[in-house]
C-alpha cells in the first residue's frame, strides 16, 4: 500500500543546530514529494518539492531535502536552526500520476527551537 | 498575485445555522480544493474541483456542500453541522488537477460549531 511516514511527531533542537526531519514513503514508483510548513493558525506554505529532476532540492528559508530512491526517503534538513523555524512540518506525497487530488500528507513533525 | 484568500478567518455557528466559507484565487489555476484540518493532525482532502467540475468527493457528509461558481471562486456551504465538524478549513489551488506542481494554500477559516 502507498503511504508516507514522518518519524518523530516532535523534534527539538537548539538555535544554530542542525535540523533533520525524516520522511519515508512506500511506493514501487518514485512519486512527487513535497515539504510544507505550517505556522500556528496559518495555512500551509511550500518549502520545496521533488518532481523527478535533481535529487537534492533546495527550498526557501535555507531548507533542503535529498531524494534517495534506494532508501525511499526525502528527509528535510537545515544546517543551522533559527527561532523562526519553529512550526509544524508536513511531508506530502503525490502517488497518483501527478494528480494533486491524490496528495497524501504525513502526520506532521512539530519543530521546537530552544534559545 | 500568488495568494489564495479565504473568508471569514473565524466563524462560530450553531448546529441549526447555515453559513458559507469562501475562497478566491487570481493565479489562473484550474484546480481548487477544500481540506479539513483538526488540531495536531494533517489536512484531510474533502473536495477537488477541476475546471469548475467536481472531480473528487472524499465521501464527505452532505451537510458540507461545495460550489465552484467560476474558475477563481470556491465556496463551501455549511448546514446542520455537528460540534465534531469544528476544525480549520483550508482552501488550496493548483495549476491543474493533473499537474505535479505545488498546492497554494489559503490561511484557512477556523470554524467552531456550538
Image: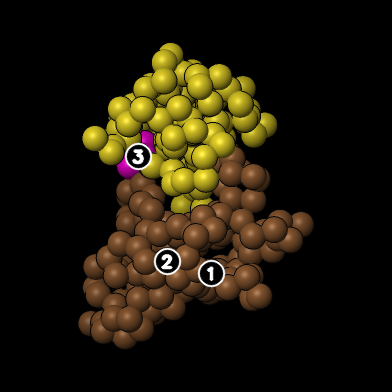
Chain colours: A brown, B yellow
- Disc 2 crowd rating (10 Å Cα; few below 14, some 14-19, many 20+) is some
* In magenta stretch: residue B108: yes
- Disc 1 crowd rating (10 Å Cα; few below 14, some 14-19, many 20+) is many
Q: Secondary structure at mark 1?
A: strand
Q: Which residue is mark 3?
A: B106
* Residue A95 to residue B36: above or below: below
Contact (Cβ within 8 Å) of mark 2 with mark 3: no
- Viewer-side residue, A100 vs B40: A100
- Say whether residue A52 is left or right of residue B25: right
Q: Any mark on residue A57, and which?
A: 2
Chain bearing tag 1 is A
The answer to whether residue B28 is visible is yes
- How far apart marks 2 and 1 lie (CA) works out to 8 Å
The part of the chain drawn in magenta is B105-110
- In the rendered image, the quadrant that contains the N terminus of chain B is top left
- How far apart marks 3 and 1 lie (CA) works out to 28 Å
- Say whether residue A82 is left or right of residue B39: left
Amino acid at each position: 500500500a502507498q503511504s508516507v511516514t514522518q518519524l518523530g511527531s516532535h523534534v527539538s533542537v537548539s538555535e544554530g543546530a542542525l535540523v533533520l526531519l525524516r520522511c519515508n514513503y512506500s511506493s514501487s514508483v518514485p512519486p512527487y514529494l513535497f515539504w510544507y510548513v505550517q505556522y500556528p493558525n496559518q495555512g500551509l506554505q511550500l518549502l520545496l518539492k521533488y518532481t523527478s529532476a535533481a535529487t537534492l532540492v533546495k527550498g526557501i528559508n535555507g531548507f533542503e531535502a535529498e531524494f534517495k530512491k534506494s532508501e525511499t526517503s526525502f528527509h528535510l534538513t537545515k544546517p543551522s536552526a533559527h527561532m523562526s523555524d519553529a512550526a509544524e512540518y508536513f511531508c506530502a506525497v503525490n502517488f497518483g500520476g501527478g494528480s494533486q487530488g491524490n496528495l497524501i500528507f504525513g502526520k506532521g513533525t512539530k519543530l521546537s527551537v530552544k534559545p | 498575485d500568488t495568494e489564495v484568500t479565504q473568508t471569514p478567518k473565524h466563524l462560530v455557528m450553531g448546529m441549526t445555522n447555515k453559513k458559507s466559507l469562501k475562497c478566491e484565487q487570481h493565479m489562473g489555476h484550474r484546480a481548487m480544493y477544500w481540506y479539513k484540518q483538526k488540531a495536531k493532525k494533517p489536512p484531510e482532502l474533502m473536495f477537488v474541483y477541476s475546471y469548475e467540475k467536481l472531480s473528487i468527493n472524499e465521501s464527505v457528509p452532505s451537510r458540507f456542500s461545495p460550489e465552484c461558481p467560476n474558475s477563481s471562486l470556491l465556496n463551501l456551504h455549511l448546514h446542520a453541522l455537528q460540534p465534531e465538524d469544528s476544525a480549520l478549513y483550508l482552501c488550496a489551488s493548483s495549476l491543474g488537477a493533473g499537474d505535479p506542481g505545488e498546492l497554494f494554500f489559503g490561511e484557512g477559516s477556523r470554524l467552531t460549531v456550538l
